[in-house]
Image (spheres, grey):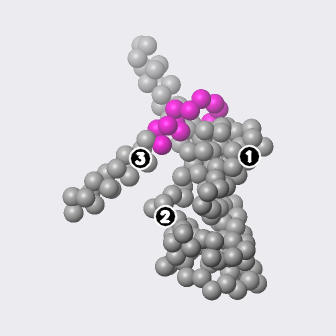
Amino acid sequence: MLKEESRYVKLKRLIRFYYLKILRLNGSPYQIAMGVACGVFGGCFPVIPGLPLQTVIAVAASFITRSNKLAAIIATWISNPFNWILFYYIQFKIGTFLLPIHVTFDPATWQVSDFMEIGWQGVTILMFGGFVLAVPLSIAAYFITLFVVRRNRKRKALRMLSRKN
């Protein structure tokens, strides 16, 4: 029980750390929000062992949109080792629903080491499912981040004004 609580506390602290790190970034709220959206977009693609595909996609998208690259890199952690199986399962379900490709694959019992065994058809399904999942999640991430950064900066400005008086 104590070990589970400590894992939960560590995860909570890690999430708060990255949240604060994003809030403290330099740049306009638009640039930060767009960077987070690019990172979430890249983070929705499957992790391929040995290839930093998520980070490459996020940074490339942030260059194209002229947004904050560090926010994009941080936001790729939307998919992390704790939730890869869930992401792959959702990506696989979306991909098999929308593509006429049939692959025998059980995401519930899958491990990252099995990635190369699913072949190009399986990778295509996961990539397409990741793209379809990435679009609405990155749009939501943009608006949520824009709201949070603006609210945080407004509060910070009000605090600074109240200290001067």
Residue 131 visible? The answer is: yes
Q: Residue at x 70, y 52 (%)?
A: 57
Q: Residues within 10 Å of mark 2 (few under 14, many from 20)?
A: few
Q: Secondary structure at mark 2?
A: loop
- Residue type, label 3: Leu
- Residue type, label 1: Ala
Would you place residue 5 above or below residue 123 in this image? above
Residue tagged by mark 3?
14
The image position of residue 47, as x and y in percent, is 60, 61
Whichever of labels 3 and 2 marks the residue nearer the N terminus, that label is 3
Q: Depth check: 104 or 97 in front?
A: 104
Would you place residue 161 above or below residue 23 in this image? above
Residue 129 visible? The answer is: no
The image position of residue 93, as x and y in percent, is 62, 78
The image position of residue 134, as x and y in percent, is 66, 61
Which image quarter is the N terminus in?
Answer: bottom left
Residue tagged by mark 2?
83
Residue tagged by mark 1?
60
Q: Residue at x 48, y 43 (%)?
A: 18
Q: Magenta part of the protein: which range?
A: 18-29
